[in-house]
Amino acid sequence: MTSWKQNVRQVVPYTPGEQPKQQNIIKLNTNENPYPPSPRVSQAIAKVSADSLRRYPDPTCASLVDAIAKYHGVDASNVFVGVGSDDVLAMSFLTFFNSDRPILFPDITYSFYDVWADLFRIPYNQKPLDSDFKLVASDYEGPCGGIVIPNPNAPTGVAEPVEFFEKIVESHPECVVIIDEAYVDFGAKSCLELVRKYDNVLVVRTFSKSRAMAGNRIGYAIGNAELIKYLSDCKFSFNSYTMDTITLAAGVASIEDDSYFKEKVDAVIATREWTKEQLKGLGFTFPDSKSNFIFAKHEFVNAVSIFEELKKRGIFVRHFSKPERIANYLRISIGTDEEMCSFIEKLKK
Ligand SMILES: *Cc1c(COP(=O)(O)O)cnc(C)c1O
């Protein structure tokens, strides 16, 4: 029997972290920022008149593109913006990963990469991290259809130096290398400098973590003007008006308040370092994190039972049951000092 189902594009979707409805919980499960965005963001949102929403937003997102370009000291032609970096990454997969050769990414990494690859029917090979959760350079040698790696990696928090990525980019003129810098503001070194030297590298960033604007959905990519042109061509063949009027205004306001941004990022880093010490004292081990989360396991107590016990006490962290070798780890996002104190107190119990 033939069925319409055989013509359906069937996929196994990405599962986002839980967004619990109850109040008074401590939410350390989706790497959100515990601080609000810059006060300038709320002022900018308040200034948008509802009447202006009659009009379509600027499809080129010029105000936001210009603000990001100025911030990074690049030309507007080097910047692409989208609805969160998930949108930017999905468009980049569609645009640049169009080869019969497999694309490469780590086995333990952002769990959206294999979903997009499956969705777009892109062949892929996942390269195992070593036992310290480090990338193995030799895994990324030889011709391939493309490479995507987060730096720092997620959910491990482990960062690699720029030279590590430069070797990969330099040895792969046949494909595009995407470096997903979702967490780079929390202490890793950015690969943005590679964009000036190589035409096959795309650096992707987001406002969701370090800029505390996950609810607005702003992501962007920086690359050679030709790459950005190809990316824009695909975007304009899919959905022209990706960014709404209110979000564009909010994004510009955030970029313009750099001192607030730095202050809050520094606060998260300080709390992270404090939390590392506390966790060590309680018998947890973890790879050194340069992000706004810590990927930790306990020497005796099983991750699932810690996860469940914390949840009962109103504290949400993230647990990944796959792949098997990370099933005993918890990913703990960094909250405020107060939240982390309470988290440590409950862990002790
Ligand atoms: C959070 C995250 C993203 C997606 O962020 P958006 O909210 O879509 O901007 C992309 N990559 C990694 C590694 C992430 O952790």
Image: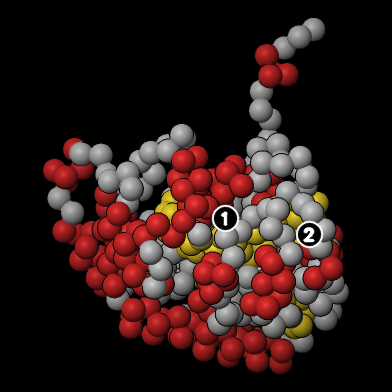
Q: Is residue 321 visible?
A: no
Q: Is residue 299 visible?
A: yes
Q: As rendered, which of 112 and 72 lies closer to the eye?
A: 72
Q: Amino acid at mark 1?
A: Glu
Q: Please report the residue visible at 50 percent of the width from the left and 47 percent of the height from the top.
A: 231
Q: Secondary structure at mark 2?
A: loop
Q: Amino acid at mark 2?
A: Asp
Left or right: where does residue 80 sit relative to residue 315?
A: left
Quadrant position of residue 30: bottom right
Quadrant position of residue 180: bottom right
Q: Secondary structure at mark 1?
A: loop
Q: Quadrant of the C terminus?
A: bottom right
Label 1 environment density (alpha carbons within 10 Å; few <14, some 14–19, many ≥20): few
Q: Please report the residue visible at 51 percent of the width from the left and 45 percent of the height from the top.
A: 230
**Mark 1 — residue?**
18
Q: Please report the residue visible at 27 percent of the width from the left and 46 percent of the height from the top.
A: 58
Q: x, y (%) of residue 184?
A: 55, 74
Q: x, y (%) of residue 225?
A: 46, 56
